[in-house]
Amino acid sequence: MKKALLIGGTGPTGPHVANGLVERGYDLTLLNRGVHAAPGLPPHTLIKADPHFRETLNEALAGRSFDLIVATYGRMRFVAEAAAGKCSQFISVGGGPAYLGCLAPWKLRPFGARIPLRENDGLADQDAGDDEPAVRFSHLVWATEQLIMNMHAAGSFSATYFRYPLIYGPRQLSPPEWTIVRRVLDGRKQMILADGGLEILSRCAARNAAQFVLLAVDRPDVAAGQIYNCADQTQWTYRQLLEEIVDIMGGDMEMISLPDRLAIPARALSTIQAVSSHFLLDTTKARSELGYADVIDPRVALNETIHWLVANPPTDYQPDRFDYAAEDRLIAAYLRAVEEVERVAPFERPAPFHIYAHPKQPGNQPDHKGR
């Protein structure tokens, strides 16, 4: 029987990947710290080890070999080095910070990441000596990808690398959806969003993220030496996400749009991004080469996520203060300021204008506006 090692396995995507491997005939071993339990895992062997350190990985994998290693957790450069020579196929998971536009969109001109963002666009491959922490971190993520691809080229294993966006689903340790869900539960009628709620950050349901990985298992020759973006085929702006969640919960909440500089409470929806921006991953490559299609509709997955959060509320959600009194003061102060600006510097809105000729009568002459 083929042997597979899944590093991780207890997060949102873990049980879906684990079950997919067993369904494909693999004898499954999990390696993780043994701290978190996950329901729905298939029969497996557990190796308790910390995948963040090379020495613990070396000790855990000594004398072992696998046909396949799927690494979704830990310090990936150490995991890859420890896996060299111990498997024929190595599938690893990283994230969007490999793109400079993810964490430091102000470093790009025009501002922000390309829309949509393909695998080779705007990577953080600049000199790691940049003194901005966001840039340094992005560069390290990119460098880890390159290390794995270089090991593939050197014959250490056949490697595939997936760039995950924000993953949502049950058991997410820091679910940004909670910032909306709790407000609905608390009866809030307003929520602050930046810049009209038009910010967009690629997301992927846990089951869909697992499907990307499993397709590389199914098509090892196609996936060999490749990097793929992962994301649902349907995406939402933050305003759309707010409205979807409020509708799922049967609530009633108005979006209050503030400039990004003032909309600090909204940053809990995107702790990875420091400013209002956009990050929309192009999944054409995975769809065309691996045959990817969503295995769960994002609306169904979001519904499952919200009901899970209602039943399992986070006990200590750090990104959001839920300081409603401060939010109310901010909203009131902003609306007063807007009224004052409109009083001091009024501008008349331009009337709608049709740029093409719109004649009132038949004929070849110019229309009534000379067009």
Image (cartoon, rainbow, N blue to C red):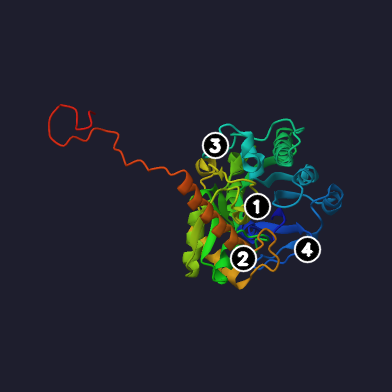
Q: Are marks 4 and 1 in contact (CB under 8 Å)?
A: no
Q: CA distance from mark 3 to mark 4?
A: 40 Å
Q: Residue, x 67% and y 35% (percent of image)?
A: 124
Which callout, 4 or 2, points to the residue nearer the camera?
Answer: 2
Tell me the element at label 2.
helix
Q: CA distance from mark 3 to mark 2?
A: 38 Å
Neighbor class of circle 2 (other Cα within 10 Å; few <14, some 14-19, many 20+) is: few
User: Hey, what amino acid is under mark 4?
Assistant: Gly
Q: Nearer the viewer, mark 3 or mark 4?
A: 3
Secondary element at image label 4? loop
Q: Earlier in the sequence, mark 1 or mark 3?
A: 3
What residue is disc 3 on? 114
Badge 3 vs badge 4, beta-carbon distance below 8 Å: no
Give the camera-side residue of 296 and 302: 302
Q: CA distance from mark 4 to mark 2?
A: 41 Å
The image's mark for residue 252 is none
In primary-sequence order, the first of circles 4 and 1 is 4
Query: 108 or 222, which is in the foreground?
Result: 108
Q: Quadrant of the C terminus?
A: top left
Q: Amino acid at mark 3?
A: Arg
Per the model, the C-alpha gap separating discs 1 and 3 is 20 Å
Q: Where residue 34 is drawn, which disc sits there?
A: 4
